[in-house]
Structure formats: structure tokens, C-alpha cells
Amino acid sequence: MNEIDHATEAAWTALMTKSRVLLEAVESSLKSAGYPPLAWYDALLELEKAGPDGLRPFELKDRILLPQYGTAETQRRRSIGHASLKALKSRSTDAKPVCDFPR
């Protein structure tokens, strides 16, 4: 088995820690601004790209980073999702940052 040197391990740990902190900050900011969780945007984008035929739950799961338990609920809300995505797009012209990213 290949051994990982200390610098590589430290870099990986820092990357994963910063990633988690950043995602938590974004999730918190979205919630406080009244927006849906970050995972919804990923699901809504994939559902929009699929077009009117949509996606089966296993197809959606393969395309996004949602845990499997979240895909059935996301699929159930498909019709709501398309309307929500259109509403979010209409807001994009006056979009402003919803959080300050940790440094």
C-alpha cells in the first residue's frame, strides 16, 4: 500500500475542513435568507436539464450529490421544483451575496 506523506495528508485535511465550513456557512445563509437548502438547487438544475420527461429517482441520485433518502422527496416535488427554479431565476437579476465566505 502506498503511504501518504504528512504534507499531502495535511493538505487534504485542510481542504475537507474548509469545504465543510464553507458549505455550513452557505447553508446557514440560505436558511436565514429564506431560501431552500443548497441541495435543492442541484436537484432542480438536474430536473430542469432533464426536460418534461423528468428523471426517475435513481437517475436523479446518480446526477447529484444528495443522499439517496432525499431523492424521493425531491422527485415528488418536481412540479413545484420547476416553478421554484423559474422564480429563483427571476430573482437573479437583482441577486446579491447571501453570505460572507469564511477565510
Image: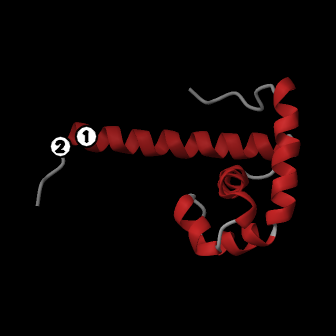
Which quarter of the picture shows residue 1?
bottom left
Residue at image position (67%, 40%) is 25
Position of residue 25 in the picture relative to residue 15 (left or right): right
Residue at image position (52%, 65%) is 62
Percent position of residue 3, x then y: 14, 52
Residue on which disc 2 sits? 5
Q: Nearer the viewer, residue 100 or 48?
A: 48
Count residues near mark 1 (Cα–Cα under 10 Å), then give few for <14, some for 14-19, many for 20+.
few
The answer to whether mark 2 and mark 1 are in CB contact below 8 A is: yes
Q: Disc 2 residue type?
A: Asp
Residue 3 in view: yes
Residue at image position (38%, 44%) is 13
Position of residue 97 in the picture relative to residue 60 (left or right): right
State the SS at label 1.
Answer: helix
Residue 35 in view: no
Percent position of residue 17, x then y: 48, 44
Coloring scheme used: secondary structure
State the SS at label 2.
Answer: loop
Count residues near mark 2 (Cα–Cα under 10 Å), then give few for <14, some for 14-19, many for 20+.
few
Residue on which disc 1 sits? 8
Count of numbered tags = 2
Percent position of residue 61, x then y: 57, 67
State the CA–CA distance, disc 2 to disc 1. 5 Å
Percent position of residue 68, x then y: 59, 72
Which quarter of the picture shows residue 22?
top right
Quadrant assignment for the C terminus: top right
On screen, residue 28 above or below 101? below
Q: Nearer the viewer, residue 9 or 36?
A: 36
Position of residue 18 in the picture relative to residue 12 (left or right): right
Residue lying farthest front? 52
